[in-house]
Amino acid sequence: MASCFSLLSNLTAALTANTVALGLGLALVQKIINLHGGTVLVNSEVGKGSCFTVRIPYHRSDNLLRTQVTTSLPSYPLLVENAQVLIIEDSVAAADQITRYLSEMGMQPIIYSQGEGAVEEVLRVQPALIILDLQLPNLSGWEVLNQLKINPKTKDIPTIIISVVDEHSKGLAQGAFEYLVKPITRAQLQVTIEKLQHPARSNSPNLIVVPEVFLDDPLILLAEDNQPNIDTMSAYLESRGYHLILANNGQQAIDLVRVQRPDLIVMDIQMPGMDGLEAIRCIRNDRQFVHIPIIALTALAMPGDRETCLAAGANEYLTKPIKLKQLVTTIQQLLGR
């Protein structure tokens, strides 16, 4: 194991040095470290400079997967410092979320809030990437996408659709690079952009060791329809090492439980369509899911609500506004940590 860890450390150090020498910046350093399951932290002080800390986890060999990773350079320079990304989105909450994610990746987000005039804005900005909502005022995202793809000056700019409407096949058929369904996580967007960076791999790969999905990294299903709550809770839980999948109504939660089999469920009670209580009951009616811990959340705390949630099958009950440390403590207790 010592040799395995040494290999990870030496490889990371070498690649980091080469990255800095090439002037490609910290974004690629972070990408390399992420491949090893590590983190990059920064501490800055005005007038004194910045200190960057790289941390690589030490894992047992049975939790590692040998895989082939190539050294081909990116074919599209998205991760260069201050690369401009045009976000065509009329929802302030969604635009703020995407802006935050892109800023953390070292990119420069620009927001345009309507469909009408979007192509002209693309021509003016000449972004490296376009993120497009479909439900826009004045002119739909579908029409914007069509105009982008028939214009020789914009047709080659990659477009990622992010929408509450799930029409993945149609989006790809009309020229979108990728299609994500809201609500999205930081990890989803980062993986999509990395796919854009590496559309084709070299034929001469190198064999190195990278982390697999570790057995001790729990998968949490967050069922919540309020976007600010999604942003806050998902960002905090991801920062604590949890993997997140998202649903914004009860039926979506049930479908994801059947497919993804999460280790724990955080279920909002007040959701459109099928509410959280009904979703909990449906999940508990399936014997294979009776042991998945469920935390019920509600903003309308009334006498007897806790008992109602527990009777439906929840293991714990928390009221909004959620105290994030309390949420993590409850998750750890239910997962036996």
Image (cartoon, helix red, strand yellow):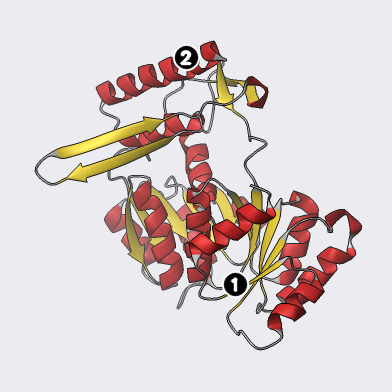
Q: Helix, strand or loop at disc 1?
A: loop
Whether residue 30 is visible, yes or no, is: yes
Please tell me whether mark 2 or mark 1 is closer to you in this view: 2
In the image, which disc is placed on residue 225?
1
Looking at the rendered structure, the kind of residue marked 1 is Asp
Q: Position of residue 211 (x, y in %)?
A: 58, 28
Of labels 2 and 1, earlier in sequence is: 2
In the image, which disc is placed on residue 152?
none
Give the CA separation, mark 2 to mark 1.
45 Å
The correct choice, above or below, for 164 with respect to 125 in the image is: below
Quadrant position of residue 276: bottom right
Looking at the rendered structure, the kind of residue marked 2 is Ser
Q: Position of residue 15 (x, y in %)?
A: 38, 20
User: Viewer-proximal residue, 200 or 118?
Assistant: 200
The correct choice, above or below, for 322 with respect to 337 in the image is: below
Residue with the most extreme bottom position: 303
Q: Residue at x 89, y 66 (%)?
A: 285
Q: Helix, strand or loop at disc 2?
A: helix
Residue with the most extreme left position: 47
Q: Residue at x 63, y 20 (%)?
A: 61
Quadrant where the N terminus sits is top right
User: Viewer-proximal residue, 34 or 119?
Assistant: 34
